[in-house]
Amino acid sequence: MITLYGWGPMFDCPSPSSFVMKSLIQLQMLGVEFDLAVADLEAVPKMKAPYLVDDGTLVEDTNFIRWHLENKLGRSLDDGLSAAEAAAGWALERMAEDHVVKNIITQRWMRDENFQKGPALFFMGIPEPQRTAVTEEVRGGMRAYMHGQGFGRHSETEQLELADRDITAIANFLGDKDYLFGDAPAAADAGVAAVLIAAACEFFETPLSGLVRRHENLVAYITRMEARYLTGHDWPVPEMA
Ligand SMILES: N[C@@H](CCC(=O)N[C@@H](CS)C(=O)NCC(=O)O)C(=O)O
């Protein structure tokens, strides 16, 4: 029995987390049976979602989830790709999860209007007066992380320029193919599409959405991936209040 822990639709998006979307897609690509449950970050050592429990074995992080299931099934999501294609897929995924994810976090967490209608809702289950203090502490931690890591020291224009380069590189690589490597999806399609779907989310006020949507092939790609893998899931609703 396999259970994937994460969060379902929020903010007009299949999940507030691109990483949860990535694992949800990869589990379906691998054809395994699984249940969905709401993540409890306090319950796992890395305190991140998604995580997976497979017959009592806890697996944390999207990459380890993927490899756990590939090892168990004796096949890879990149079967059929050349070594060079698999390497390119890995690099594209890493690229999407670097600048683009950091932009998504910054745009959602540091812009007040986005934070109030978005991430602030994660803290609604905490009673006042602790809620305000906890919310500000976590938000401050996010700001400190971005500054310490270095990305937060770029101006917003510079941050978005980096995202634009990544997104344009993905659009150019995809070209007129249905998936990154042709007619069939591979491992990288999960992570790359998940990040693009999160970036393109129009619920938030952000230039990121336009950076994705100005590429017609990316709009068709994320629409295709969303229809194939991210609709109709029976996610339990997290307790917010
Ligand atoms: N490298 C991890 C990243 C997972 C991740 O950053 N998850 C976020 C949600 S998008 C999270 O759980 N954040 C909670 C926190 O950092 O406290 C993976 O690939 O699974």
Image (spheres, helix red, strand yellow):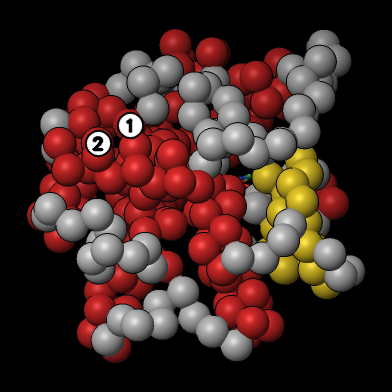
Count of numbered circles in the view: 2
What residue appears at the point 60 percent right and 88 percent down from the top-left corner? 74
Image quarter in which the N terminus is found: bottom right
Where is residue 46 shown, x and y percent of the image? Answer: 71, 59
Residue 138 placement: quadrant:
top right
Q: Nearer the viewer, residue 59 or 46?
A: 59
Image height check: is 90 above or below 121? Answer: below
Q: Amino acid at mark 1?
A: Ala
- SS assignment at label 2: helix
Q: Is residue 189 above or below residue 230?
A: below
Q: Secondary structure at mark 1?
A: helix
Q: Is residue 180 above or below residue 102?
A: below
Instruction: Tell whether 115 sits left or right of 42.
Output: left
Q: Position of residue 13 (x, y in %)?
A: 49, 29
Q: In the image, is 87 to the left or to the right of 77?
A: left
Residue at the disc numbered 1:
200
| Front position among marks 2 and 1 | 2
Q: Amino acid at mark 2?
A: Val
Q: Which residue lies under the disc numbered 2?
A: 219
- Please report the residue visible at 71 percent of the width from the left and 36 percent of the height from the top: 235
Does the CB distance between marks 2 and 1 fall below 8 Å?
Answer: yes
- Residue drawn where x is 23% and y is 65% of the image: 182
The mark that comes first in sequence, 2 or 1, is 1
Measure the C-alpha gap from mark 2 to mark 1. 9 Å
**Observer-nearest residue: 176 or 12?**
176
Seen as rendered, the residue at the extreme right is 56
Give me the residue at 80% from left, 68% from top: 54
Q: Quadrant of residue 137?
A: top right
Q: Residues within 10 Å of mark 1 (few under 14, many from 20)?
A: many
Density class for disc 2 (Cα within 10 Å; few <14, some 14-19, many ≥20) is some
Direction from residue 147 to residue 160 in the image, left or right: left
90 horizontally vs 167: left or right = right
